[in-house]
Amino acid sequence: MFEKLGHVIVRRRKAMVILFIVSILTAGTVGTMIFSRLDSGGYSNPNSDSYQVYNYLNKNLKIADPNVVVVVDSGNLSITNPTIVAKAQLLEAEMAKAPRVTKVVSYWNTGGEKTLAATDGKAAYILVYGQDEAFTPESQEMGAYFQKNFDGKRDGLNIYSGGVGVVGNAINKKIADDLKIAEAISIPLTFILLVIVFGAMAASAMPLLVGVSAILGAFFLLYLISLVTSVSVYALNLTTGMGLGLGIDYALLIVNRFREELHRGKSVEDSIVDTMASAGKTVFYSGLTVLVTLFSLTFFPLPFLKSFGYAGVSVVAIAIAGALFGLPPILAMLGKRIDKGVVRKSAIEHKDEGRWAQTARLVMKRPVAVVLLSLMVLGIMAAPIKNIAFSQGDSRILPASNPAAVATAIQESRFESNIATIDIIVLDGAGKENEISNYIEEVKKVSGIVTVAAPQAIGNDIRITAYESMLPRSPEAQKLINELRDLPAPAGTLIGGVAADYTDTQDGIAETLPLALGWIAISVLILLFVFTGSIILPIKAVLLNVMSLAATMGVMTWIFVDGHLQWLVGSFTVTGTLDTSIVILIFVVVFGLSMDYELFLLSRIREEHLTGKSNIESVATGLQRSARIITAAAVLLAVVFAAFVTSGVTSIKMMGFGVAFAVVLDATLIRALLVPALMRLLGERNWWAPKAMQRFTIKH
């Protein structure tokens, strides 16, 4: 199939290049429309009790969380001082006239509701409700308006605007600004590294071409997806990082093999055909492995993680298409001019014997020592994982100096109760007065509950509102909700609110994780078996990936949970936790990329083995011919993701560091040392499979 495709590409190269360019331009024009359609939410589990409560309150009472939470600080005066009251009322009236505002509720217009007052009596809340749900782009526009017009000193008052609309807008803006900086760093640096790797200007431009086309194509697909479902703003970083990284990976493999065939004296057509039959096939199967791995993100109930699944599948699919249908016809047109603009002549030469082959032979002379030493290093890196703890992102992922983060910090430090309440609905509670009264007394005793409002009748149903003291998206809040749900409660009791929503989200991730991991393990094992014809190699690859990921999680715990190395990764607010969704994302992305490199290496080793070479010679030659590409691809991908470490948003910083570290670890300690050492120990057993199963493998 791939040989036939190679012949078609050579014959139709001009038409295919024109189609490729038109497709990129079209995708770029339409795809950029995605930026105005992104949201910063998507953390809720739509299958949960808390979501049912949210819908119930929305439908029956038109109750929703405020879009903007404003803290008004009166300085040294009491909030009941007539002068302060008059100023606050004027402020409320002005806020009520702001765009998209439907209602304003405050300490002052509720007659002094104590839950809206600070503990020192010198600050109070103004809650601003809008036409739109909390995490929508429209809500964030409202947040941007309030941060611009109602934040800072004003008429003797200190005003701090926060809440989901403001925080969502601040995160979106920070990510967009940081993305520009990351791209400004990574793209020029990537090109410089590509010139060093390829040694020629013409060849160096090819990976960037595929990478950019993958990003623009993915933006186009995400725009289409956004027409039918929500897409998270965080998906942009994954799209950019994976698009540029995979585009570079696949183009490196294709271009390197094309040049290798040309340098053997083959014609341009034969070089294209042989490249497609070898590197093209590897790109297809390695891309398919990454794609099915990232597809597992769509299993999770959270729209946030689903967005990453949509982005990942889109960008991998386009990267594969660009590498197989866009790049080869360009190479066919360039021919031997691919080596134009020589910068480093030694990079153009292809040797069967060199540093990597020597390294492989050295490793295979002492395989047991190398395995033990490598496992010891991985174990040391993984050790801090015992301190790992999880939560979800809130305003603390922003720089501590960001006005939205400052507003939230003031809410937490100066107010006894959190503005995000716990809503308890007792369905069909009529006639259960004594039971409900006893239940409320038990709720009041739970640690973290500040007060409980009088129950409210909604037809035959009863609503109970409880006020909590901690941040709602935290392990402490999750413990509180679990304790509440463990209390004996009247039949038909549902617990909702932000803390319950957070708890249900964490539970939804935990419940889906076995399915996602099972899908990844089984699909990857099958694909690797089909590609290699071995039972042993896929199992070994999965186990090595798990070890590499454990080491990565250990290092991330040491940095982001324990708060080390801020001088290297940049300052961030230490919360003592890792963002659950980001950890899941890193795990899936890194697992997929690791399999990418595994296939790159195994394809060359197997190719040599099929020519009749011994296991040792196959590994040495295969490593020599592929390790330079794997290392280059890993370094380039690490540069792309490491650029995200410059972000002021902690979750993006975490993702950038986690992927970059894991990729470098995988390409060095795992692929360069552990893989050849283990292949030496297993010998010819590496390629074993039952004869009955061998008919299901591809022919090389």
Image: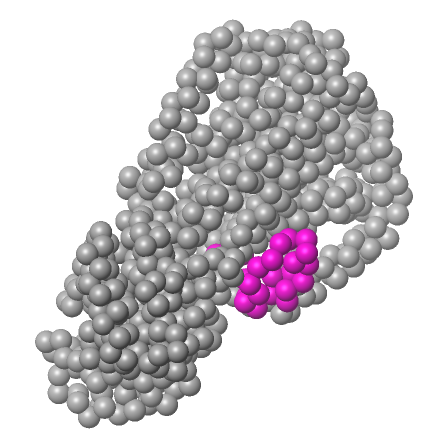
Residue 299, given in percent of the width and then of the height, sits at 41, 51
Would residue 651 be found to the left or right of residue 224 on screen? right
Which residue: 56% across, 51% down?
A: 653
Left or right of 587 on screen, residue 197:
right
Is 331 on the left-hand or right-hand side of 223? right
Which residue sits at x=61%, y=10%?
334
Quadrant hosting residue 684: top right
Percent of width and height locating residue 379: 73, 61
Foreground pick, 254 / 211: 211
The quadrant of the rendering that contains the C terminus is: top right
Which residue is located at x 51 percent, y 53 percent? 649
Above/below status of 609 relative to 93: above
In the image, is residue 184 above or below residue 275?
below
In the rendering, at what x and y percent does residue 408 appear? 42, 66
Give the magenta-colored segment's residue range.
559-584
Using the rendered view, name the quadrant where residue 375 is placed. Answer: bottom right
Image mark count? 0
Relative side of 41 to 674, left or right: left
Residue 11 magenta-highlighted? no
Is residue 504 at all visible to an observer of this figure? no
Chosen colour scheme? one colour
- The vertical placement of 430 against 584, above or below, is below
Residue 620: x and y, percent? 81, 33
